[in-house]
Amino acid sequence: MTAVNEINSLFGNRIFLSTFFSLIFAQALKTIVYLLTHKHKTLMEAIETAIWRTGGMPSSHSALVCSLTTSAGFFEGISSNWFVFSLVFALVVLRDSLGVRRAAGLQARALNALGKKVSEKTDLEFQPVKEINGHTMQEVVVGAILGILISVGFFVASL
């Protein structure tokens, strides 16, 4: 099979397409929500949100992994190895977005606030740490539902 045929085959794969569109749609919604809820925004912030920024409503990670799992269940069957693998992968990603990444982001935010206060009072230089944006339960649930619904749409369209 040639490289062109393989690429065409990939873009004809319903599992790939539903997962890809779930990610793109969630990121587009996240950008719209960001633009509507933040007063001071620049074009660069909007582009960064659309392409790269983590956190926010809805969770694109949740949409992606839930779409992958749902599509694997529909198109490969829930007893397939692909479904089992994608389900376990989805559980790890969902747990990480709610737990580890969110906690790390909150701790970094608190550390930066403390460092700034100490720096102002002592004239010591403080380099802020990167604040990782995790997700709230609501952001994860909305992303998950979005991914599942998009996969259902791809399955129904294939009937």
Image: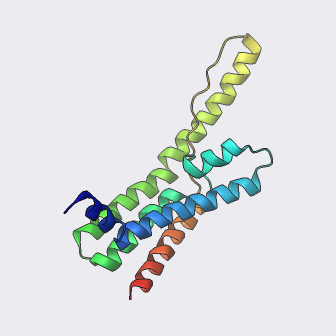
Measured as percent of width and height from the top left, residue 60 is found at: 52, 58
In depth, the one of 149 and 51 nearer the eye is 51
Q: Quadrant of residue 141?
A: bottom right
Q: Residue at x 33, y 72 (%)?
A: 72
Q: Residue furthest right?
A: 39
In this view, the residue farthest toward the top is: 123
Residue at point 73% right, 54% down?
Answer: 35
* Occupied quadrant, residue 69: bottom left
Determine whether 34 is above or below 149 in the image.
Answer: above
Quadrant containing the N terminus is bottom left
Q: Is residue 55 visible?
A: no
Image location of residue 98, percent across then percent down: 51, 53
Tell me: residue 15, above or below residue 64: below
Going by the picture, which residue comes out furthest to the bottom? 159
Occupied quadrant, residue 67 = bottom left
x%, y% of residue 7?
31, 61
Viewport quadrant of the C terminus: bottom left
Q: Name, please, the residue furthest toward the left.
A: 1
In the rendering, at what x and y percent does residue 112 appear?
64, 29
Above or below, comparing residue 132 to residue 96 in the picture: above
Task: Give whichever of 83, 42 is nearer the camera.
Answer: 42
Residue at 57% of width from left, 53% of height from top? 135
Q: Residue at x 34, y 71 (%)?
A: 13
User: How many dots with numbers?
Assistant: 0
> Which color scheme did the rendering employ for the protein?
rainbow
Q: Decide if residue 106 is in sight here.
A: yes
